[in-house]
């Protein structure tokens, strides 16, 4: 340990960490992108404010299950816990490949007070996806208790089919292209989702999120 | 390693006679109307194992036939096995009527092997109980030696010479050797009469012809090194139970009783230095019904958490229409382990306390069955791959497998399409169906349901699935990926269509790529 004396504090920490890693312990790197943002697929991170889903605020997403499944897979893969409220039609089979199913908590039928259930879940999970089959616009009075609990917890809240007054981020997503399928040939190998993001204090931005095989560049 | 096997011939008959000394000498135990075991006196009159009971009674009119009772066999054997424990430290009961003892250690302790074996026989001696002993280097050889000619001691290293002369049928005679009866018989049919002849065959040839069972027989015949004697280790019974004087008829009273019970349980676990990872809550009603459920926990359950689980379990039962009073409540830790401190030290253990706390609150609002966790169960379609189990509850066995022919990713994410039936049409407005050869009957041109119409831009499949025909969940379907373009929309849409065969003959949307 005497060889540490000549090093600076940062170098000492690095050296000791590498020794701990050699012992088999390893220092856990922060798995989610900092304290305030949850990492998302890289295509989407380019256009979202802060490069991910911001914690403790509402993100409003249009009804696009493919994008939501991608988000869930990404969040669970980095060790986050996800709650899905009121969306029995969402197929979680797509999460298996890239994410972890066991960190998902599903409440298919939240009963008479879905907002209350969402309000409880945001206090303990990392991402809560709540969906209303019938579009619902929350008045400021109804939204206030939920937003208060959201600020008290750690979670990012994604609302699908419901709106709050002035959400932090609004994401519009549509599936545009199916790749790899022909007339009786091939199969669907890639899906393109066109995403348009409107965030507070930023100009709107658009991008394409690809699930599965990406578009190939070809020499024409 | 030296092993002594102590065999009590026809143990069920001997056990019955210990239980009731007035039974006559001609005695048999029957299983499903056939003679399972008979006494020596009965055998001399012509009764054999496997005979029908009526036939045996015709052969020997004095025969007393008892029903099989594994409980009695085990109970009577318990006292004998306990007596053997005084002589040798390592005693393993293979089945009631057969024990193996580590003779090497016992021999060193008592001076010599023959002295130890003699003491074993003395310890097993009771009035009217027969026992034979066999000693050899391996467990299997010792079992065979005990059965041959009133018991034999096979000298160290002489197992192969001893086994060479023994008939192959001995393998099937002892159930603890786990040799298939049909396999042994076919060995005999092939002209392999003795274990020596079997051991002389090449091992690969025997395994190729007879599989794992054949390999096992061959290992026994060539006296291959076997496992060691594994005595039953004492395990502490940590379960706690309460039987209230008056049956509990209120859920809150039951939760209160559970809270006290949980406190006792945790005191016991703490004394043993363990934490409970799986807990079984068992409630017994006054009419004898038992409600049980297994809870998996990642941390030591607190008193209130245990009480909550009991309350949820009883609540669920009450809302399902249950009625009655609670006669007993049992908390049984199924799986315990040392506390997981190492993970916390190195930071590899994620803190999930907050998650559990909020899920517990939602469960107490909605009920346990409405907060679910997805599980991968496997399947070729999309919806059938995921099953849901209540949070915190142990699920069933997960079906593993590669599922060849499954729909590959990217998977559609939208299930339960509202349209019950869709039509796939050809250019001439005929319905496109899937033929018996799993081909489309025509080139699809349009797809539609209700007032929706899409022109088919691309399709892939059909991929047939014909499974479950052996059971009630027969599934004869075909799946087709279809990309459709509506007149007034900019972007195409895609679905995974499901063709229901088996006489129904219609298309349905299994899932949508949205």
Image (tube, coloured by chain):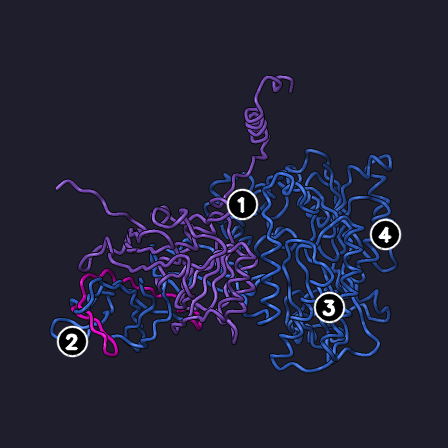
Chain colours: A purple, B blue
Q: Relative to A201, is A11 above or below?
A: above
Q: Chain of mark 3?
A: B
Which residue corresponds to mark 3? B69
> Is residue B399 among the parts visible in the rendering?
no
Q: Earlier in the sequence, mark 2 or mark 3?
A: 3
Which residue corresponds to mark 4? B83
Q: Find the magenta span and give its range.
A: B445-473
> Where residue B35 sits: x, y (%)?
67, 68
Inter-mark Cα distance, 2 to 3: 68 Å
Disc 4 residue crowd, few under 14, some 14–19, many 20+, Cα 10 Å: some
Mark 2 on the same chain as mark 3: yes
Q: Secondary structure at mark 3?
A: loop
Inter-mark Cα distance, 4 to 3: 23 Å
Disc 1 residue crowd, few under 14, some 14–19, many 20+, Cα 10 Å: some
Which residue corresponds to mark 2? B430
Q: Relative to B133, is B496 above or below?
A: below
Mark 4 or 2: in front is 2
Q: Nearer the viewer, residue B168 or A110?
A: A110
Inter-mark Cα distance, 4 to 1: 36 Å
Disc 2 residue crowd, few under 14, some 14–19, many 20+, Cα 10 Å: some
Quarter residue B432 falls in: bottom left
Mark 2 and mark 3 residues within 8 Å of each other at the beta carbon: no
Q: Relative to B415, is B83 above or below?
A: above
Inter-mark Cα distance, 4 to 2: 84 Å
Q: Is residue A164 left or right of residue B145?
A: left
Asked whether residue B446 is drawn in magenta, I would say yes
Q: Nearer the viewer, residue A122 or B296?
A: A122
Mark 4 on the same chain as mark 3: yes
Which residue corresponds to mark 1? B215
Disc 3 residue crowd, few under 14, some 14–19, many 20+, Cα 10 Å: some
């Amino acid at each position: 340990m005497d060889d540490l004396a000549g090093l600076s504090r940062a170098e000492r920490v690095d050296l000791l960490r590498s020794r701990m890693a050699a012992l088999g312990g390893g220092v856990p790197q922060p798995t989610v992108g900092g304290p305030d943002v949850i990492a998302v697929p890289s295509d989407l991170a380019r256009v979202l404010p802060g490069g991910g889903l911001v914690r403790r605020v509402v993100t409003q997403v249009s009804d696009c299950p493919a994008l939501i499944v991608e988000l869930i897979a990404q969040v669970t893969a980095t060790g986050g816990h996800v709650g899905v409220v009121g969306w029995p039609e969402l197929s979680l089979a797509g999460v298996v490949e890239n994410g972890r199913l066991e960190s998902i908590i599903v409440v298919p039928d939240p009963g008479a007070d879905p907002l209350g259930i969402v309000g409880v879940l945001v206090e303990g999970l990392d991402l809560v996806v709540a969906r209303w089959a019938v579009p619902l616009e929350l008045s400021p009075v109804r939204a206030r208790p939920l937003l208060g609990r959201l600020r008290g917890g750690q979670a990012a809240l994604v609302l699908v089919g419901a709106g709050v007054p002035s959400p932090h981020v609004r994401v519009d997503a549509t599936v545009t292209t199916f790749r790899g399928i022909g007339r009786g040939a091939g199969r669907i190998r890639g899906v393109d989702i066109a995403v348009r993001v409107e965030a507070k204090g930023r100009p709107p931005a658009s991008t394409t999120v690809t699930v599965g095989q990406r578009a190939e560049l070809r020499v024409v | 390693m030296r092993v002594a096997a102590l065999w009590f011939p026809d143990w069920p008959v001997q056990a019955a006679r210990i239980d009731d000394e007035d039974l006559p000498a001609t005695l048999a135990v029957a299983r499903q109307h056939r003679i399972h075991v008979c006494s020596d006196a009965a055998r001399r009159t012509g009764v054999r194992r496997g005979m029908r009971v009526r036939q045996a009674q015709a052969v020997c009119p004095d025969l007393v036939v008892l029903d099989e009772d594994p409980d009695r066999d085990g109970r009577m054997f318990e006292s004998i096995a306990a007596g053997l424990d005084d002589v040798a430290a390592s005693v393993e009961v293979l089945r009631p009527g057969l024990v193996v003892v580590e003779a090497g250690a016992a021999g060193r302790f008592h001076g010599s092997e023959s002295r130890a074996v003699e003491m074993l026989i003395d310890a097993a001696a009771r009035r009217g109980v027969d026992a034979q002993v066999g000693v050899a280097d391996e467990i299997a050889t010792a079992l065979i030696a005990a059965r041959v000619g009133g018991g034999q001691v096979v000298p160290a290293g002489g197992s192969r010479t001893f086994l060479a002369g023994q008939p192959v049928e001995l393998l099937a005679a002892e159930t603890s050797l786990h040799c298939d009866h049909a396999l042994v018989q076919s060995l005999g049919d092939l002209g392999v009469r003795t274990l020596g002849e079997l051991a002389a065959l090449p091992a690969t040839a025997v395994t190729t012809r007879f599989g794992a069972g054949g390999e096992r027989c061959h290992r026994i015949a060539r006296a291959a090194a076997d496992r060691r004697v594994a005595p039953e280790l004492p395990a502490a019974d940590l379960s706690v139970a309460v039987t209230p004087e008056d049956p509990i008829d209120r859920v809150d009273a039951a939760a209160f009783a559970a809270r006290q019970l949980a406190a006792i349980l945790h005191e016991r676990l703490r004394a043993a230095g363990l934490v409970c990872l799986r807990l079984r809550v068992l409630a017994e009603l006054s009419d004898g019904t038992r409600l049980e459920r297994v809870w998996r926990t990642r941390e030591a359950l607190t008193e209130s958490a245990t009480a909550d689980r009991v309350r949820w379990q009883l609540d669920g039962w009450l809302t399902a229409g249950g009625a009655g009073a609670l006669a007993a409540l049992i908390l049984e830790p199924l799986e315990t382990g040392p506390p997981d401190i190492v993970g916390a030290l190195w930071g590899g253990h994620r803190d999930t306390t907050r998650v559990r706390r909020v899920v517990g609150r939602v469960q107490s609002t909605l009920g346990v069955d409405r907060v679910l966790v997805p599980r991968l169960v496997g399947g070729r379609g999309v919806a059938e791959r995921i099953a849901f189990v209540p949070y915190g509850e142990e699920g069933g066995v997960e079906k593993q497998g590669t599922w060849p022919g499954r729909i590959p990713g990217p998977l559609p994410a939208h299930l339960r399409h509202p349209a019950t039936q869709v039509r796939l049409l050809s250019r001439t407005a005929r319905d496109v169906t899937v033929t018996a050869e799993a081909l489309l009957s025509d080139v699809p041109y349009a797809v539609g349901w209700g007032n929706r119409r899409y022109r088919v831009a691309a399709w892939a499949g059909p991929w047939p699935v014909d499974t479950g025909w052996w059971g009630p969940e027969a599934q004869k379907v075909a799946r087709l990926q279809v990309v459709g373009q509506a007149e007034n929309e900019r972007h195409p849409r895609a679905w995974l269509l499901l063709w229901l065969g088996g006489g129904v003959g219609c298309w349905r949307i299994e899932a949508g790529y949205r």
